[in-house]
Image (cartoon, rainbow, N blue to C red):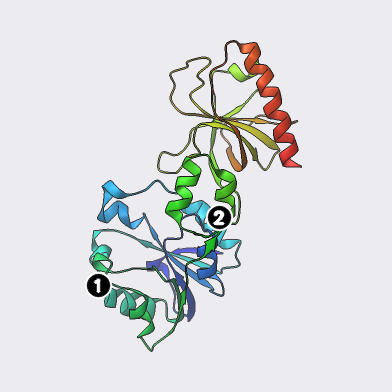
Amino acid sequence: MRVTMLSEVRGRTRRVAVGEFDGVHLGHREVIGGSDTVLTFEPHPLRVVRPEAAPKLLTSLETKAELIAALGVEELVVIPFDEGFAHQTPQEFVDHILVEQLHATRVSVGENFRFGHRAAGDPELLVADGRFETRVVPLVEVDGEIVSSSHIRGLVLAGEVETATRFLGAPFQLRGAVVKGDQRGRTLGFPTANIIPDEALVCPGHGIYAARTSQACAAVSIGVRPTFGTGRGLLVEAYLLDWEGDLYGSELRLEFLARLRGERRFESPEALIEQMRHDVERTRGLCR
């Protein structure tokens, strides 16, 4: 899949899906279906128009692009969202971007899609334009709840990664470069790969999780190590089962399968080690 900025777009007709698509969840996948081009915005519009209300995101642009590519899309077009773009009227967006630059023959959006200055544009404006076909996709529900990025963010923050997976259509991912820690896991018999989460992205709530990586299954701890009181802030530590190697400096991708338990303080390192053994065995069972 090609990833291009709007200014680099070349003339050809396109079937375009438009949206922010944070998380590329089941609702987004319905909107994208049948499109050869996805049009999205970077950064998230709220970071420009209402920074105080801007959410932490489920996916970086890189991760979003990979998830969209897996849907068979040919091209991801990125609009740099800035003050100038934010003041563009809905009609200007339709005329200059959808028609003149993208040569859209079909435009696909979710029923709650809004665009243009002060979010004044809506799907009805697109439907009324006879220069392209408009496909308006109803909101998708799972277990009686509407699938939305904001709801999924809340699930991830609460540690409910299994429910988040049902709404996303794939496990929630956390990525980061492996950095050197204090080697405490090694002294306990469970050497871990440590990553520092991106502060702009959602991170699962404190607890112990079963996850999958490209190398192996992993028991993952997210928290502040209350047993040892490190005072280092949030730590993400992954013990890769039955795997040995050096990951320092490389990117580790964690796909969360389940939350095993909450984070808690143990009376001794020995008690912690015993619990870690149980966590590893549960992880092994979930990864089969």
The spot of residue 82 in percent (x, y) is: 28, 58
Asked if residue 113 shows in the view, the reply is yes
Q: Which mark is residue 168?
A: 2
Where residue 218 sits, quadrant-wise, is top right
Q: Is 160 rendered above or below residue 74? A: above
83 is higher (above) or lower (below) than 210: below
The residue located at (28%, 69%) in the rendering is 116
Q: Position of residue 49 (x, y in %)?
A: 25, 56
The residue type indicated by label 1 comes to Thr
Q: Which residue is mark 1?
A: 89
SS of the residue under disc 2: helix
Residue at 32 percent across and 59 percent down: it is 81
First along the sequence among labels 2 and 1: 1
Is 24 left or right of 219, judged from the image as shown?
left
| Residue projecting furthest to the bottom | 130
Q: Residue farthest to the front?
A: 144
The C terminus sits in image quarter? top right
Q: In the image shown, does 32 or 226 lie closer to the viewer?
A: 226
Whether the residues at callouts 2 and 1 have beta carbons within 8 Å, the answer is no
Discs 2/1, front: 2
Q: Residues within 10 Å of mark 1 (few under 14, many from 20)?
A: some
Q: Nearer the viewer, residue 91 or 3?
A: 91
Q: Residue at x 47, y 41 (%)?
A: 157
Q: Alpha carbon of mark 2 to alpha carbon of mark 1: how far?
A: 32 Å
Task: Give the residue type at disc 2.
Answer: Leu
What residue sits 38% from the left and 83% below the top?
A: 127
Quarter of the image with the N terminus is: bottom right
Q: Position of residue 91 (x, y in %)?
A: 28, 78
Circle 1 SS class: loop
Q: Is residue 59 visible?
A: no
